[in-house]
Image (spheres, grey):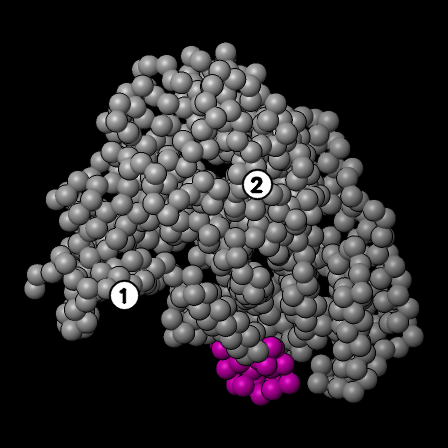
Amino acid sequence: MKTNLETGLTEEEVAQKSAAGKVNTTIDDEFKTNRQIIVENTFTYFNLIFLVLTILLLIAGDIRDMTFLPVIILNTIVGIVQEIRAKSVLSKLQVLNQTKLLVLRGGKRRQVPIDQLVEGDLVLLKAGDQIPADAKVVDGSVRVNESLLTGESDEIAKEVGDELLSGSFVVSGEVMVQLVKVGSESYIAKLTAEAKAMGGGEESKMIRAINRLIKWVGIIIIPMGLALFAQAYFLNHRSFAESISSMEAAIIGMIPEGLYLLTTVALALAAMRLARNQVMLHNMKSVETLARVNVLCVDKTGTITEPKMAVEKVVPAKNYPGNDLEDRLAAYVSNMPVDNITAEALNQKFGQDQPLVNAKRIIPFTSVNKYSGAVFAGYTLLLGAPEMILRSQLKACQEEFARYPEEGYRVLAFAKYPAELADEKERLTQEVEVLGYVLLSNPIRKEAKETFAYFAKQGVEIKVISGDNPVTVSRVAGQAGIAGAEKYIDAQTIKPGEYEQAMAEYNVFGRVKPEQKKEFVQALQKIGKTVAMTGDGVNDIMAMKEADCSIAMASGNSAAVQASQVVLLDSNFAKMPQVVNNIERSAGLFLVKNIFSLLMAVFSLILTINYPIKPAQITLISSFTIGLPSFLLALEKNHSRIRGNFTVNILTKSIPGGITDWLAVSILVLTNKFTNIGDNEVATASTALLVLVGLMVLFWISRPLNKYKLGVLALSVVCIILSIIFIPGFFKLSPLSGRAVFTVVVLFFAGMTLFRIMSRICDGIKEVSNVLTEKGKDAKLRDLLAAYGKDRDEL
């Protein structure tokens, strides 16, 4: 079936192609299916262990110790529901934000989503468009960048008959192409499939750390459980039911049954919260990456300023005698395509319905030349960056426009070149006649100051990277309240090998070429920074791909949007502070119980005593001092940046509580040898101790307190009190004697002192770890000492 180049495919031909599967869709494995989500959340290693424990308890006939079962079922259901909801929200956003291209069908041009294109379609592509499928040029000519495919940033000319590879993008020109390979047959689809096959195991740092913890717990619990059962049954001569109960309590305590679920749900909730604020993630891992960023690279236009420009003034050149400057600008502008915000501003000021004089040809703007031109008989009118057009004449003309960048204007030089340029590859070799200067301005976004103040508070450095004059960029950055805006440099003066030093010393970079943006990102990463790169144009893509996190404005071109991890759907950078970070705090609560249970199990084996706490009592402790508050705290908005090593951070939060729990209960068990309060009272007293210490840990981890956190604490206390009053038998709680109550009170206050000391030490260790993670070998002893003494208030 051959495509008619005049009319394109008919609707009937499109339907036939679709039915034959020749559609530009690939298998979308970004999101799991609902079935995969259900299977992955249900058939887990720990759920299998809980199933075995349930069967053993049924055999032993002790149904009351199965109180953990409703919690496990609820955890599984919550995880499934939240993940499916998050997938639904994000997939809907992706459909809303789907890229559309202009297609010729049935003799009419129409906008068609890229996944509805079919083999043989005629597609019109212009500057900024990413090529959606392998294609052949049938009309026009363009320059394309295949850097995403080849790694080479050179622009390649494509004429009629040439092939275009999907994944490359149009830099300049306009062309009609015919799609020849679509969907999974296209070049980019095959590359993507290979990349996903190689990177299929890629996970966030938090998920990797949690998986390591869970792996070691999984290895330990089975031999530990068998040892505890054997000790209780064979050495201590307890009944089968008592031995099973003793073993089960230890194992349940050691399993972080809600930790992985908490992380998944917290990431899902964060993604949903961002989605409601018009921030789309291409994968949920991006939530953590965003929260870890400590350097943010932004462009001036569209990020600090509104994504629009206005011509403020036209200044004639000092030696230009004519008074027809605006007419000449009108002649130039009316011949040029309106394909970017600068062209829109010029067209609004000088554009005519019909050109006053038709140009022979157009010299398109390229990121290398930084100017465009209109060729007339015997000469070429040029408009662009003064240093690129004036060259050796720049110094002589500098005083004519030098003050305008300092006033915040962007300056374009307008000049007459005394020859007809053949194309954008031809170099300027002769002097130009300077006609004048066009002054443009961008209004600062009204929310810019507040946004950048937030990042400064979070310790996130802002690096402004722009192709404009560094003085202009510095002035605009200062108006937006960016710290260090006065530290600016012309990127053209930076030599190879000096990038790391420049990134450390300066905050504003002007005259930046596209290939330098990638160098800047790499330099920042070499000095230990986690870098986010924002962009909206094709010249940002290589740097965005190199960055730890890439953020695109939806108002930008389709190539930038598709290359990014995060898309700001309303192109409003002020939505960035909606990133949340509550996982570390809640994860620390879970590990308190796991550390205590492991230490207590080892202690019981060494002293050949039965594990002192019942499974039902572990459920009470887990539910109201860990499970309920951890999920509620994960829901709270917390925009703090994630710092340091995740494993170190959660261990320093949980070790003080875990050790305090173990020491308090161990002393209580040992004192039973002298007080003879009985096994049942020891179990209940141990539960009381663990509840009190658990609430103390919850209080410490929740600092600084606010109304929401106080509400969570109060709810946990109320649930515990109600459980003790109304269903003590359900949790196998027995009345406590005066001696037992006295022992619990003494041990709690002793434990409080110990916990406070250990927590302050661990807080210091965490801060030292954060500095070492961020600064690496550049960390000085004074930095480590200052970090150790930071933020360690008395309880």
Looking at the picture, tell me which residue is in the foreground, 360 or 108.
360
Is residue 451 shown left or right of residue 725? Answer: left
Residue displayed at 27% across by 45% down = 174
Residue 666 image offset from top left, x and y in percent: 75, 61
Residue underneath mark 1: 116
Residue displayed at 46% across by 71% down = 88
Residue underneath mark 2: 442
- The mark closer to the camera, 2 or 1, is 2
Specify whether residue 60 is painted magenta.
yes
* Relative to 784, residue 107 above or below: below
The reply to whether residue 731 is in sight is yes
CA separation, marks 2 and 1?
37 Å
Looking at the picture, tell me which residue is in the foreground, 180 or 672.
180
Residue displayed at 36% across by 54% down = 200
> Based on the displayed image, in which of its 4 quarters is residue 638 positioned?
bottom right
Residue displayed at 45% across by 57% down = 283
Residue 282 image offset from top left, x and y in percent: 44, 57
Is residue 492 shown left or right of residue 603? Answer: left
Q: Please, what is the dominant secondary structure of the magenta stretch?
A: helix
Is residue 159 shown left or right of residue 487? Answer: left
| Residue type, label 1 | Gln
Specify whether residue 709 is painted magenta.
no
Looking at the picture, tell me which residue is in the foreground, 527 or 134.
134
Residue 13: assigned label? none
| Residue type, label 2 | Asn
Q: Which residues are magenta?
A: 50-72
